[in-house]
Image (cartoon, rainbow, N blue to C red):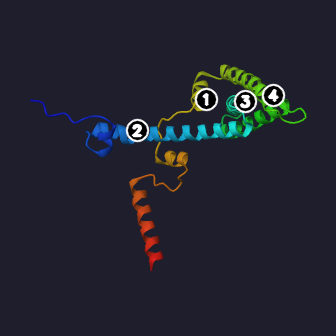
Amino acid sequence: RRPPRRPLGAPWALSGQADGLARVTVRDDRLRRGLTGAGAGAALGLAGAMFQTMLRNPLAAPDIIGFTAGANLGALLAVLLTGGMILTGALAGGALGAALVIALSWRAGLDTHRLILVGIGASLTLGAGADLLLSYADENTAADMTRWLTGTLHARGPADIAQVWGCPLLPSSRADARAHVGLRWRLMSKHNR
């Protein structure tokens, strides 16, 4: 006779009733990726909504009007020219892309329709430049840069979850959690004296 199977699935794994493999898979891998992805998606959605509200146009988004393409091109240039400094290149590329779009759109003030049309053209042009740079890179660098540009949820942990959700004090391990609870208990007992 076979022993009865324990139910599989996220609710049972989260409650600790599933077998070891399911519990480890859900708690240590899928849950971290899911929470990180949900937080990053919420932050990007909020940024897009703020941008659209600010410019009063539903087409206005950083990925549509060229800011993201400028950041991608800057990151690729930084990797190919220096072998590193990806974040610095992305920040500089995004800022230069934004400045280029605003400068080309400015004519006796900033019209949002003109900004969006110029931004779409800049996005396509800068994106083509990034694709051209990727074609000149060696195979491994191109694969790594593509993964960096598109993003990945691989190997995400509690620190990533805390960073995405804006909770820098979230403990990253059980030992940190015990120390965090102990610190809070000591602070509360000092305050209550």
Identify the residue position indicated by label 1 in the image.
145
Q: Residue 114: which numbered mark, if any?
A: 4
Identify the residue position indicated by label 3 in the image.
65
Q: Earlier in the sequence, mark 2 or mark 1?
A: 2
Left of 87 or right of it: where is 152?
left
| Circle nearer the viewer, 2 or 4 | 4
Instruction: For marks 1 and 3, give the CA distance.
Output: 22 Å
Residue under the image location 53 percent in, 52 percent down: 167
Q: Are marks 1 and 4 in contact (CB under 8 Å)?
A: no
Left of 19 or right of it: where is 94?
right
Identify the residue position indicated by label 2 in the image.
29
Q: Earlier in the sequence, mark 2 or mark 4?
A: 2
Q: Quadrant of the C terminus?
A: bottom left
Q: What amino acid is at disc 3?
A: Ile
Residue under the image location 70 percent in, 40 percent down: 88
| Circle nearer the viewer, 1 or 3 | 3
Instruction: For marks 2 and 1, give the CA distance.
Output: 24 Å
Q: Are marks 2 and 1 in contact (CB under 8 Å)?
A: no
Q: What amino acid is at disc 1?
A: Met
